[in-house]
Amino acid sequence: MIRLALVRHAKSDWGDPSLDDHDRPLNDRGMQDAPRMAARLRASGFAADVILSSTALRARTTAEAFGAELEIPVSLDPELYGAPAGSILGAAAATGAGAVVVVAHDPGMSVLAARLSDGDIAHMPTCAVATFTWSADDWDVATGIDPDDWTFATPH
């Protein structure tokens, strides 16, 4: 079985316009939402083998909350910063792991979630979590077919 959790980074802070986009931290809401959504993912029974994250500060901080809750380390992937949908799915598949969490950005996350849900997930708000399950045991097979099941949760 292949399982994928897409997590859009939590709400970021826009208070310092001098910061580079890559260096924007989470705001207070984001700092509360990330651990709460991580706990919800764990409570759903999703046991991850790998967490991949964009190198952007807001994504890394979100991923660290998920890593702490799921008790696994976070692997940073600079290619996930601003990645399109196909690259996000490709990065997950490249791990070869059975259950992968990817923390990244829009528009790639929303486009991929929409594609995998046949359009039912129109938008991934900040800290939204979408999970997808395939009965296939091989990413090459899974990425070529529709998932058997999916879920979608938002913090608000």
Image (cartoon, rainbow, N blue to C red):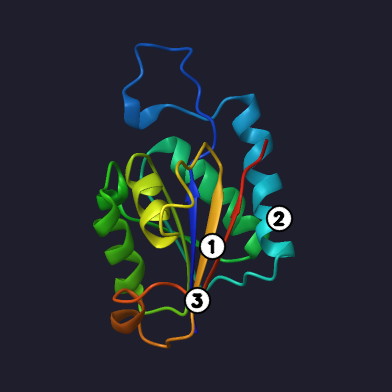
To which residue does mark 2 refer? 40
Q: Residue furthest front?
A: 119
At label 1, counting other C-alpha atoms closer than 10 Å, the crowd grade (few under 14, some 14-19, many 20 or more) is many
To which residue does mark 3 refer? 148
Residue 4: x and y in percent read: 47, 67
Residue visible at 36% across and 57% down in the picture:
115
Q: CA distance from mark 2 to mark 1?
A: 12 Å
Residue 94: x and y in percent read: 29, 72
Q: CA distance from mark 1 to mark 3?
A: 11 Å
Residue 51: x and y in percent read: 47, 62
User: If you read the primary sequence from the N terminus, does the residue marked by circle 2 or circle 3 appear first?
Assistant: 2
Residue 147 image label? none
Residue 3: x and y in percent read: 50, 73
Q: Nearer the viewer, mark 2 or mark 3?
A: 3
Residue visible at 57% across and 66% down in the picture:
72
Quadrant in the picture for the C terminus? top right
To which residue does mark 1 refer? 131
Q: Is 80 displayed left or right of 70 in the figure? A: left
Q: Nearer the viewer, mark 1 or mark 3?
A: 3
Would you place residue 80 above or below residue 56 in this image?
Answer: below
Q: CA distance from mark 2 to mark 3?
A: 21 Å
